[in-house]
Amino acid sequence: MSEKKVYTVGRQAEVRLFEKLVSGDEPLPVLNIYGPGGIGKTIVGRKMREFATGRETPLAFIDGDRQELTPYRILRQIGNDLTVNEIVEEALSSFNK
């Protein structure tokens, strides 16, 4: 059985901006990907996560489609995502307590 391929159509601008962000060429601390449902936002987010992981770059990805997305849950997700990186985990250890 062949592996299902996922294509990103029309979201290349966000991917390029993210590449600049990870490489240090863009001073943005947050990249907001928005638009109507079904246009590839989650796929772009997943590709960004893969890109960042491959470069050992800390990344927190919040999917706004999650049910009951409260400020507490957003902070918890950011903490969980960022502490995958050992250096960030050490820096956030006091916060996580």
Image (cartoon, rainbow, N blue to C red):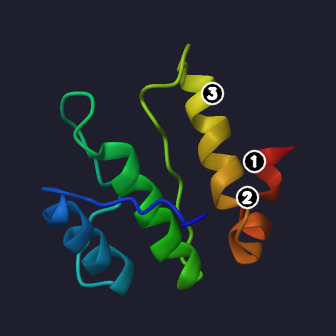
Position of residue 67 in the picture relative to residue 90 (left or right): left
Q: Which residue is mark 1?
A: 95
**Amino acid type at image mark 2:** Leu
Question: Dot 2: within a 10 Å radius of its alpha carbon, few (fewer than 14), some, or many (20 or more) residues?
Answer: some
Residue 80: where, in percent of width, then height?
Answer: 71, 49
- When asked about the image quadrant of residue 16, the answer is bottom left
Q: Where 16 sits versus 71, above or below? A: below
**Which residue is pictured at 70% across the width and 71% down the height?**
85
Q: Which mark is residue 3?
A: none
Residue 44: where, in percent of width, then height?
Answer: 34, 56
Q: Which residue is mark 2?
A: 92
- In the rendered image, the residue lying farthest to the right is 97
Between the C-alphas of marks 3 and 2, the distance is: 16 Å
Q: Which residue is mark 3?
A: 73
- For the residue pair 11 and 89, the one nearer the viewer reads as 11
Between the C-alphas of marks 1 and 2, the distance is: 5 Å
Between the C-alphas of marks 1 and 3, the distance is: 15 Å
Question: Dot 1: within a 10 Å radius of its alpha carbon, few (fewer than 14), some, or many (20 or more) residues?
Answer: few
